[in-house]
Image (cartoon, grey):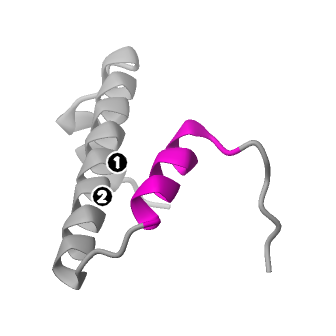
Amino acid sequence: MNAIKLPLSNVQVELMKIYSTNISEPELHELKNLLAQFYAKKSIENANEVWKKNNLSNETMDSWLNEKS
């Protein structure tokens, strides 16, 4: 089993508060979806920043996808 690292992050503390209560399976599923959507949005925002910073385009991606190894 993994040891718990202290101190906990602010996210871990908030999640511990949430997980200290019992919620129904549908609510748990909804919570998981909300977290997934949150992190998906953050990932897309970060990818968009990289694209802008590096002047990438759909044409660049198509070119890379069609390169022969």
At label 1, the amino acid type is Tyr
Residue depicted at 35% across the width and 75% down the height:
22
The residue to which callout 2 is attached is 36
Q: Give the residues drawn in magenta, as a range.
A: 8-20
x and y, in percent, of residue 23 in the image: 28, 74
Q: How many marks?
A: 2
Residue depicted at 39% across the width and 68% down the height:
21
x and y, in percent, of residue 60 in the image: 28, 35
The residue to which callout 1 is attached is 39
In which quadrant will I find the N terminus?
bottom right
Which mark is drawn over residue 66? none
Horizontally, is 61 left or right of 11 in the view? left
Q: Dot 2 lies on which element? A: helix
Residue depicted at 33% across the width and 38% down the height:
42
Q: Is residue 66 above or below residue 8?
A: below
Front-lying residue, 22 or 37: 22
Residue 27 appears in which quarter of the rendering? bottom left
Q: Dot 1, how many residues are within 10 Å of its Cα: few (below 14), some (14-19), or many (20+)?
A: few
Q: Is residue 51 above or below residue 3?
A: above
Q: Main secondary structure of the magenta part?
A: helix
